[in-house]
Amino acid sequence: MDNPFSLEGKTVLVTGASSGIGRSVAIECARLGATLVLTGRNERNLHETLQSLEGGKEHQVIIADLSNEEDVNKLIMSLPPLDGLVCNAGVGKMLPVQFYSLDVLEEVFGINVFAPMLLIKLLVRKKKLKNPSSIVFTASISGYSNVAPANGIYGASKSALSAYMKYAALELAGKGIRCNAVHPGRIQTPLIENRLLSEEDVAKDVDMYPLKRYGKPEEVAHAIIYLLSDAAAWVTGTNLVIDGGRSLK
């Protein structure tokens, strides 16, 4: 019997593939047979991801800043037809409400929301997404729960991304393109390790997770693989929470 979770014969574009969840998604997709197109801004880190991939496929690296229109157009022109897209590129910014600025809002929403919206517009226009195909967005539980001080811009951007996913799922269903989002809790990635939290703060935060630990990037990757695979062929417009039970509290 064929494995419905296999990605053999599928080509998948992963944005933000240079580290963290994006790198793990690429590695796990390759293990299940996919051919990967990796994109991001950090060339060295992208090539480190490339060196980590298994399977002997002709994987590809395309350096691109998704907030740069010229880079996006070059990326689109370089792409083969895609079976899957993982919109994972993202940025976090912690600021209390009274310190918000238009520059910060534009930066975070530009990368977390506008870039994937405009990328998908071009992918659809240029017919780069096959029928059938799957788009998975990396959102966050900060987008709908786990409300914390100084995290409003990031949380609002991820909420907007999740809302957009539903509209895209509805509009693109006729083209055989499924759209879903994963909502991780805290994952052990550089995005959270660089924050200025004391060991005591981290211990208190971990205690809010019923499973008493943060997630691993590969645990999010496995959920994304499900949504990319034929096992999820009848799943679209769905938000999948992966948070060790954090949203239960």
Image: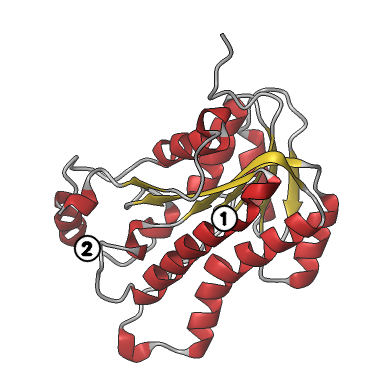
74 vs 187, left or right, is: right
x, y (%) of residue 191? 43, 58
Residue 102 visible somewhere in the drawing: yes
For label 1, the residue is 170
Residue drawn at 44 percent across, 57 percent down: 139
For marks 2 and 1, give the CA distance: 43 Å
Q: In what element is the residue under mark 1?
A: helix
Image quadrant occupied by the C terminus: bottom left
Q: Quadrant of residue 210?
A: top left
x, y (%) of residue 183? 39, 52
24 vs 247, left or right, is: right
Work out which residue is located at the far top of the displayed protein and give it. 1
For label 2, the residue is 198
Q: Amino acid at mark 1?
A: Leu
Which label sits in the foreground, 2 or 1?
A: 1
Residue drawn at 19 percent across, 48 percent down: 209
Density class for disc 1 (Cα within 10 Å; few <14, some 14-19, many ≥20) is some
